[in-house]
Image (cartoon, helix red, strand yellow):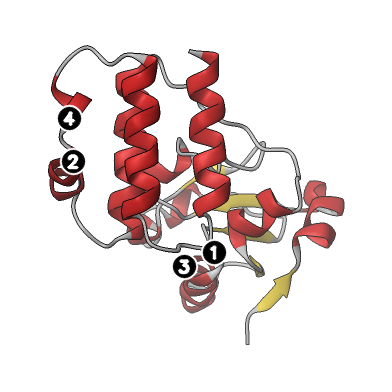
Amino acid sequence: MTEELGVGEAAARLVEFTVIDVRGETEWVGPLGRVTGARLIPLPELGARAAEIPRGKPLLMICRSGVRSAKACAQLGELGLGPAVNLVGGMIAWNRAELPVERTAPANRAALLDSAIAWLAQVTAQNADSARAKLGGALGREVTATDAADVLDAIERLAGTPADLDLSLAAFRAALAEL
């Protein structure tokens, strides 16, 4: 059975761990941000990149919700690496607890919308081109602040009810306000 930690205890003991984030690159730079000092090794690459994982400290495995990181803990156990501890609730729980995160600021409004579309594609289990096609509108020209806000509103309507809807849209809107 995989050892698990809640976000409060994990944050208090963070220095005890090597933190490995197993989300994809678009999530790493996406609205939920990342735990300071975490290393990105996406779950599909974990086995091939196992040699990159430092030894000597327990591993704290993180993903968006805690599901992929639990799989990563099991995979590392099979590879004889660890101990590996799963962060319960992942980055969603970390953000809900208002713990510190690093975020990648988008370079411009178009980059912000690319990130938002990648998020929408993930939470609706479709590819980015399909998500982009459903949005249309402002995506093919210079993006104004109003256009970007309208697209974020459309994304909110199309996204359904993912667990991080409020957190992600708040992060996207805050980034838009900074641009």
In the picture of the structure, the residue carrying the numbered disc 3 is 68
Residue 85, image quadrant: bottom right
**Spatial separation of the CA atoms under disc 1 and disc 4:** 32 Å
Q: Check disc 2 and report its element: helix, strand or loop.
A: helix
* Picture coordinates of residue 45, whole percent (x, y): 34, 56
Type of amino acid at the residue the image marks with label 4? Gly
In the picture of the structure, the residue carrying the numbered disc 4 is 137
Type of amino acid at the residue the image marks with label 1? Ser
Identify the residue at image location x=54%, y=42%.
Answer: 39
The nearer-to-camera label among 1 and 4 is 4
In the picture of the structure, the residue carrying the numbered disc 2 is 132
* Picture coordinates of residue 155, whole percent (x, y): 34, 45
Say if 131 sits above or below 175 in the image: below
In the picture of the structure, the residue carrying the numbered disc 1 is 65
Residue 84, image quadrant: bottom right
* Picture coordinates of residue 21, whole percent (x, y): 53, 51
Is there CB contact under 8 Å for labels 1 and 4?
no
N-term mark: 2 or 1: 1
**Spatial separation of the CA atoms under disc 2 and disc 1:** 24 Å
Q: Check disc 3 and report its element: helix, strand or loop.
A: helix
Q: Check disc 1 and report its element: helix, strand or loop.
A: loop
Q: Check disc 4 and report its element: helix, strand or loop.
A: helix
The nearer-to-camera label among 3 and 4 is 4
Q: Nearer the viewer, residue 138 or 125?
A: 138
**Residue 70 appears left or right of 135:** right
State which quarter of the image contains the N terminus. bottom right
N-term mark: 1 or 4: 1
Say if 104 sits above or below 153 in the image: above
